[in-house]
Amino acid sequence: MSLAEVYLFLDIGSLSNTVITIIAGGIIAGIVYVTRSGAEYASSADDTEIVKKYKLEGISCKGSDPKIWYDMDSEARLRLTYEIDGEWITGTLDGSFYMQKEEIEELVRRGETIDICVDPLDHTKFCLMDELYRQKKIHTSEKTVTSVINGTEMIGLIVKLLIGIAVLGWLYYMVHK
């Protein structure tokens, strides 16, 4: 092998190393971006419509005199009495917010006042304030990645990948110059 052939081989080898480095950097940047975007999406997951209604328009107050009430399906529901605009109302836990019978019995046994949020349209329905802020959609990583890739974030992903590849290429060029 002549010296020229060795230099040509090394030049092709460094070119392929550059390409491999850029591709690997792009893949790593893509994985980091998708993971970070997925985590942000999951942590700020949209509330269900019922939760939004209570959070944005609900009436905050304190419910007292907890009792167990059975609906037509013999399902145990929490019943409280509360005051809204000077009017005393007896309402039941909104069916969208499930409580086990044992939890209701414990609240009745304690007999304490409870922070609640009342349905803005139907004052006879409420949800527990602490339960309201625990209600979030649960997103699996598969759904999160799919939504990131299917949404408008795909364009941002491609742009960021290209920028990442360009930066890595520039860094590689500067190191091997």
Image (cartoon, rainbow, N blue to C red):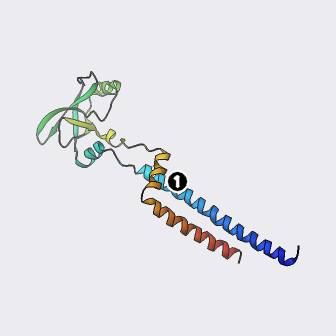
Q: Residue at x 56, y 56 (%)?
A: 31
Lateral position of residue 93 relative to residue 140, left or right: left
User: Eyeballing the image, is 33 above or below 58?
Assistant: below
Name the residue at the right extreme.
1
Amino acid marked by disc 1: Thr
User: Eyeballing the image, is 88 above or below 171?
Assistant: above
Pointer 1: what residue? 35
Q: Position of residue 134 (x, y in %)?
A: 37, 41
> Observer-nearest residue: 76 or 113?
76
Q: Position of residue 3 (x, y in %)?
A: 86, 77
User: Eyeballing the image, is 41 above or below 26?
Assistant: above
Name the residue at the top extreme.
74
Q: Quadrant of the N terminus?
A: bottom right
Q: Residue at x 79, y 72 (%)?
A: 10
| Snapshot quadrant of residue 26 | bottom right
> Observer-nearest residue: 9 or 105?
9
Q: Disc 1 on helix, strand or loop?
A: helix
Q: Position of residue 145 (x, y in %)?
A: 49, 51
Lateral position of residue 123 relative to residue 130, left or right: left
> Observer-nearest residue: 171 or 19?
19
